[in-house]
Every structure is written in C-alpha cells, then in structure tokens.
Amino acid sequence: FSKRNGSNSFNYYQQSMNADALKRLTVEQNLRIALDSNELSLAYQPQIDLGTGKLSGFEALLRWNSQELGQVPPMEFIPVAEECGLMIPIGDWVIKTACQQAKEWIDDGLSIPRIGVNVSICQFTQANFLETVREILNETCLPAEFLQIEITESLLLSKTVNIAKTLKGLNELGVQIAIDDFGTGYSNLSRLKEMPINQLKIDRSFVCGIDDNLKNRSILTAIIAMASGIDLGVIAEGVETDGQLGFLKNEECDEVQGFLISYPMNKEMASEYLKTKVFLPT
Ligand code: C2E
Ligand code: MG
Ligand code: MG
Ligand code: MG
C-alpha cells in the first residue's frame, strides 16, 4: 500500500481493526491465567434502605488486577470472558467468593442483610446452574436468603432454555432475584409478574438525568409505582447527588446505591464500613 494511491484511510482502518483484535486476544490470554494467579477480587458497594437509612445489602463487583495489563474494567473483560467460555468458571468463583465473604461477616457479627451477585446469561443458562448455586450455598453454609442473583432483562426474553424453571428453582431454594439495569431492555411486563422476581434495579441512566430532565423523572416515578403495584422491591442505581436522593425518597423508592453513598470497596474497607459506618439519617 502506498500513500500515493489514496489508500491511507483504508490502511489506518485496517491497522485499528488489528489493534482491536490484538487487544482482545491479549485480554483473553491474560484472563486465562487470572483465576489461578489470584488476580481476581470482588469489590463491595453498599445499598441503603431509604425507609430505615440502614444498609440493605452489598453488591459484589468483579475486579481484575492483571500483572500484564494492570487494572482492567469489567466492561472490557467480561464480554471477552463470555465469548471465550471463561465466564462460567469465573462466574462460579464470583458466587462462591461472595457467599464465603457474606458468611464470614455474619459469623463476625457484622450485619450484612444481603449479598448481590451479577450473573451472565451464559452462566445462568448452563444446565447445572441451579445445582452449582445449591452446592455453593451448602459448602459456604450461607443461608440462601442472603444471596441475591442479579440478571438482566434480556434473559427473561430468551426462549432457548428453560429460564422459568431455573428461576423457580432458585426461588424454592430461597435465593432472591433482581433484574439489573431495569428499563434499558425490552421488558415484558406481564412476564415480570409471572416470574419469581424480588427486586428491580433501575438503570443509572434514568437516575443521572433527573436533575434537569423531566422525562427521566417521569420514567423513574412510573417504574417505582409499577414495582410497588406488582409487589416488587425497587432500588435506584447510580445515585450521585443529594438532589437525586431527595427525589427518590420523595417517590418512596425502597433502596438506593451509588457513589453518593459509597464507591465499591475492597473487602478490608467493606469490613471497616460494616463496623463503623453510620448510615443515612432518616
Ligand atoms: P452493574 O451490575 O449495573 O453494576 C453497577 C456498576 O455501576 C458498577 O460498575 C459500579 O461501580 C457502577 N456504579 C455504582 N454506583 C455508581 C454511580 O453512582 N455512578 C456511576 N457512574 N457508576 C456507578 P463496574 O464495577 O465497572 O461494573 C460494570 C458492569 O460489569 C456491572 O454493571 C455488571 O454488569 C458487570 N459486572 C461486574 N461484576 C460482574 C460479575 O461478577 N459478573 C458479571 N456477569 N458481570 C459483572
Ligand atoms: Mg449489577
Ligand atoms: Mg446495574
Ligand atoms: Mg448498569
């Protein structure tokens, strides 16, 4: 390729394609050793009950500190893990680690009402997913009611496997189910009502706009009203300002989670938080 024949932009395009593919490959190769090299950890973000001002749960969020690549954000490595089959072992590790940690806090007398864990569709639709959860709860001795599994709306639409059966099985175990990033997918509201779901997590895109966007405020009000109408708990994600918190309190949203309350914390900081934190004034 020469500069003279005007192929410059094409060249550039090709190079950037290669750079993306290379990056993805690098992520994949390093991710393959991440579990065994102890490069993965969980961060815990508090969730607050607006009625009591107290902690209602922690969401466990996966962190990867790669020796080669440094800290890689979940949005960059989770899609890769899902594509190359690594999300199953990594996801099992996440559930187990979160359950172990919750049990440890309970045994230490630290009040942790609930631990939320994100589960990918590819993980949830494994034939043995229910069995895996049951085994982890047995092994870690965590009472099932403490575990909340977060799934996305799109999972409810999938007809390929028997989602309803797995949800029912989890519900019978006593595990709680939350729908994550609610409002961004194509929710089938009648399906929601039929499924054993405990909580809707309103996506933060609706929350971040409410200070100056009347439409987002209307959407939030509608979701909160709908959730309480069909007896679902509702939590707003991504609460960053006092204005947002005030609005959500006023609309009687059950719970909040966001940087205003706390950033996700490593386990040492989360333990400290459980010991010392005075929660929201009511
Ligand atoms: P998510 O489940 O919706 O998690 C909430 C994300 O929003 C987290 O990003 C959290 O750090 C961030 N966040 C919390 N409060 C605020 C706020 O006030 N403002 C803003 N701007 N952001 C806030 P994170 O940790 O980077 O995770 C991103 C996504 O990666 C998660 O979104 C979830 O979909 C996925 N993820 C994380 N851990 C796991 C995991 O163990 N398994 C699976 N399958 N997915 C995971
Ligand atoms: Mg989540
Ligand atoms: Mg979310
Ligand atoms: Mg989200």
Image (cartoon, helix red, strand yellow):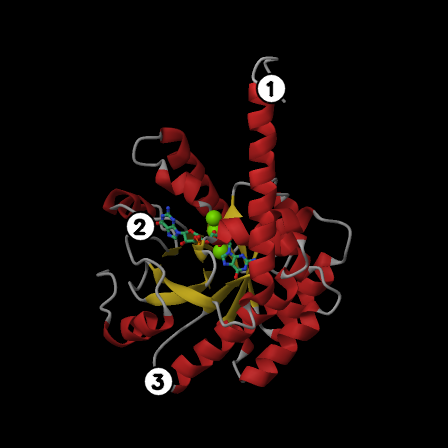
Other-residue count near label 2 (Cα within 10 Å), few / some / many at <14 / 14–19 / ≥20: some
User: How many numbered markers are drawn?
Assistant: 3
Give the CA separation, mark 2 to mark 1: 63 Å
Other-residue count near label 1 (Cα within 10 Å), few / some / many at <14 / 14–19 / ≥20: few
Q: Which residue is mark 2?
A: 249
SS for dot 2: helix
Give whichever of 36, 12 is nearer the camera: 12
Q: Residue at x 75, y 65 (%)?
A: 127
Q: Residue at x 58, y 48 (%)?
A: 24
Check mark 2 vs ligand 1: CB closer than 8 Å? yes or no.
no
Quadrant (top left, top right, bottom left, bottom right) of the N terminus: top right
**Residue 43, quarter of picture:** bottom left
Q: Which residue is mark 1?
A: 2
Residue 247 spot, x, y in % from top left: 30, 43
Sequence-first disc among 3 and 1: 1
Q: Amino acid at mark 2?
A: Lys
Q: Residue furthest top?
A: 5
Q: Which residue is mark 3?
A: 109
Q: Amino acid at mark 3?
A: Gly
Residue 134 spot, x, y in % from top left: 64, 77
